[in-house]
Image (cartoon, rainbow, N blue to C red):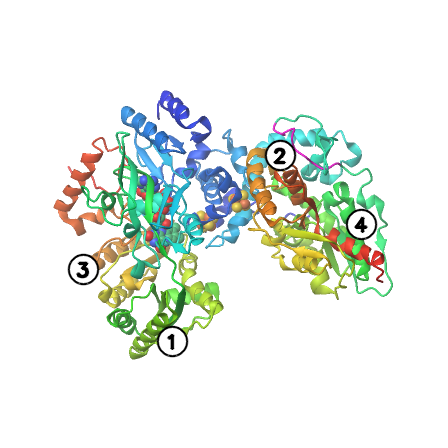
Amino acid sequence: MSTATATIYDDLALVKEELSRCMKCGNCQAVCPVFITEKTEGGVARGKIALAQAIIDGTIDLDDPDMYEHIFNCLVCKSCMQNCPTKVNFDKIIFALRAAIAKKKGLHPVKKNIFKLLHNYKPLFDLGMRAGGAFQGLFMKQIPSRQGRQLRFPIGILDRKRILPSLSATPFRSQVPEKVTVKNPQATVAFFTGCSINYIYPQFGQDIVTVLKKNNVNVIIPQDQHCCGVAVFAHGDVQTAREMAKANLDALEKTNADYVVFGCGSCASTLSHEYKEMLKGDADYAEKVEKWSKKSIEISTFLMKKIDFRKPEGVVNATVTYHDSCHLKKTMKVFNEPREIIKSIPGVTFKEMSKPDACCGSGGTYNLTHYETSTGILKRKIDDINKTKADVAVTACPGCLIQIIDGIEQFGEGQKGTHYISLLAESYRNEKKNGKK
Amino acid sequence: MLDKAVIEKLEKIVGAENVLTKKADLVAYSYDATADVQKALPDVVVLPSSTAEIQQIMKLANETDTPVYTRGSGTNLSGGCIPLKQGIVLCTQKMNKILEIDPDNLTATVQAGVIVADLNSAVAAHGLIYPPDPGTVATATMGGTVAECAGGLRGLKYGVTKHYVMGMEVVLPTGDVVRFGGKTVKNVTAYDFASLFVGSEGTLGIVTEITAKLIPAPKYKKSMLALYKNLADAGKSVSGIIKAHVIPATLEIMDAMTMETVENYAKVGLPSGYAALLLIEVDGMAKDAVEAEAEAVVKVIKENNGELRVAENDAEREKLWAARRAALPALAQLGNTVVIEDATVPRSRIADMLVELDGIRTKYNVTLGTFGHAGDGNLHPTIMYNCDNKEEAERVHKAVDEIFAAALKFGGTLSGEHGIGIAKMPYLKDELGESGLEMMRTIQKSFDPKNLLNPGKLVPAKEV
Ligand SMILES: Cc1cc2nc3c(=O)[nH]c(=O)nc-3n(C[C@H](O)[C@H](O)[C@H](O)COP(=O)(O)OP(=O)(O)OC[C@H]3O[C@@H](n4cnc5c(N)ncnc54)[C@H](O)[C@@H]3O)c2cc1C
Ligand code: SF4
Ligand code: SF4
């Protein structure tokens, strides 16, 4: 075992230098979804930076009873970082705070309960289950609703009105072979499914495979891949996150693929950006993390920039609007390619919503622990979707989609919510219908 | 510590969810955007939504002798929000309703917590603008900008906040409410109360509502950049442009140190080897007039040995402006503490002031860059340092003392737009003299005899 050098996730004091980059200008107020909703300074990056400073200075203790509430009142959407004149890496600060509190006091009490309940679902409880992030569905019961289900058990803070998706009977990775090959491949990719596609939206996984096949690409779906680990990391359990990162890197290493593609903005940004951060100073993995971070790209980047994209010809009649996932836009800086793909589909009218990159309020489990604020943020997003008069709202992240479908049910006008890649797959499938290909 | 009964009464007034008492919450109200000033925790933070609630809060504070610190977005640069003597922080950020836009009278009436940029987006639909545009338009509140008399990039042509306040509603330290001014262009009824409350930094009363003047948005703009090998030429250009009877909307300056830092930070294509640059924008309603003004500016620049770049399209204009916007963030990278001053001199003394600042930089060996609103004589000498280094901090404080002395020597003022707060209070006597301070105390006492509103700011206590 390698012993990595101490990082900000092992010792909070080390984050001091990052804190000192904040010039307290308050610019983050203009974009922070939590602040815009709650209007309290404790919710915005500047307030949390002050809190971290106070902890380091000893003016307030990590044991303070309100600490969990404050440290977890953040979506880690990185909107503040886009607007920060001095480029404070706020994500590092918030993760370091969470690592510090998890180390001292254990996991967030609400999360602990969720994780405990999850233990009862042994067959699904792999490494990734500890995250809880994608598994809100477990707590939901089937109700007559168009796109989802409602709460199964009342767990404290969870609102019974919530509409959440059901778990798939057969996870995606059990539905497909490990290798899907084509004749004369343009490239070979590994498909990192992430938990949401694997357990909740296997159809998107199928759609991604369809799209890749139509573009003459070999697909490897490593069976030994895990949850990406971002939820565990974001809850401060850095040690588990590191284990997951290493396991995934080992699984990818075996594939020898040209690229790793994702249908989830969060997983994509985790492998391309956060693994380097998590494994900083770990000499054994330095090379692997460098190599696979670089190869990790979202499916749209792969289709538009790495191969000859085959233009779809099947008609899909729909007016479509696109929501930018925070991780895809703000971490990966990918926003053009998904739009180009959507616009390439015959029959689709694209309507941009106002502030398409405003956070939807999902934030992994933020919508469980801070439901009211999350719903306030979500309502603004759905209002913006309503104004476009689009009948389909798409995004690149299943996490956002769970949230948006819930929001449409509460505040929307009956729009359909789906992954943009599914529209593309539908277009390819419709080619036969239209008598093409 | 505040009595529990007071907290409970506050909860009755604004609702428990709008009263913050947890320490982790209070930490976030112990500072504002000012570097190098002390922090202090309040006892409680309240977030009222109406004038009636503010009246009740103020009455309660008056009865219990509790200090009240009005806070907008906490972006001021003079320590104006810091609750030095504990008590109540009254934050206006939930008072964010635009009450009326009146395109017939060119006015807007807003609650104090409305963000300046939100007012501008709302009036844009009518082809109007609210011109005062501090660097913080997207965050600062109308109340905060009124209380600081905020300026901005367009001050030279369009003036500052005080030129756009037509009426107000204010809650006094007794809890009584007064309304004055309104939608009339002219109004000489009684004292000029608006002038008294603009720039009062939360000391005389709590501004709850503002009737603001709007103007038609200029239709045409032209931006230019001029580079100078020596400061005197840049200074002469500034007065030359005004002498040629052109009043640009923007006339900004950057010194060599700032230019170099901006270029390293933002890579916007600023050349090295120059002493200063001017960024000039002329605007107006008619294309011909704007072109003619631009030509006149070009002539002055050339006469004064400036090298010229003109933005031919929006993309190029954007590039010139990116350089200006990067000034503060770029400088801020150079230290963990950033002191931004706003000492202001008569426009004709800009070059003298810049030379003086160069001298101060060398004398105290400090990292000092200067940029600012040259057309207003309003410079932002900005010093970056490491606050953990006592010896360096000492030198910085001495340099700051000398900056203020220099501004006054040239017939200028301590603060052009950031206010006095706590940061500049020690220097106030140098500008106003003892009699001036006494006048301030008299005014403050007549409004707030118990010294409840923002105590310890703006008005220096009498030395005993
Ligand atoms: C990066 C940066 C750039 C800046 N650029 C400029 C600039 O170009 N020009 C400029 O002028 N300033 C500038 N400032 C300073 C700052 O933005 C202004 O002072 C602004 O007016 C403060 O508004 P606020 O809502 O944040 O007020 P706050 O900081 O919350 O309060 C400022 C003062 O006003 C008082 N106050 C607030 N609301 C009320 C009210 N309703 N009634 C009575 N008193 C009240 C407070 O007690 C305090 O004394 C800049 C600041 C930063 C950080
Ligand atoms: S990451 Fe998002 S929620 Fe958290 S402080 Fe920044 S903008 Fe606010
Ligand atoms: S925008 Fe950046 S520098 Fe400004 S207060 Fe927020 S985190 Fe600090």
Q: Would you say B158 lies left or right of A232 here?
A: left
Q: Residue at x 29, y 64 (%)?
A: B375
For the residue pair B82 and B104, the one nearer the viewer reads as B104
Residue B440 % position (x, y):
18, 42
Q: Amino acid at mark 2?
A: Leu
Q: Give the residue at mark 1.
A: B308
Residue wearing tag 3: B409
Q: Contact (CB < 8 A) between labels 1 and 2?
A: no
Residue B69 located left or right of residue A181: left
Q: Give the CA separation, mark 2 to mark 4.
A: 29 Å
Q: Nearer the viewer, mark 1 or mark 3?
A: 1
Assess whether residue A287 is covered by the magenta stretch. no
Instruction: Residue B121 in the image: state x and y as whole percent.
Output: 44, 51
What is the chain identity of the residue bearing mark 2?
A
Local packing at callout 1 (Cα closer than 10 Å; few below 14, some 14-19, many 20+) is some
Amino acid type indicated by mark 3: Lys
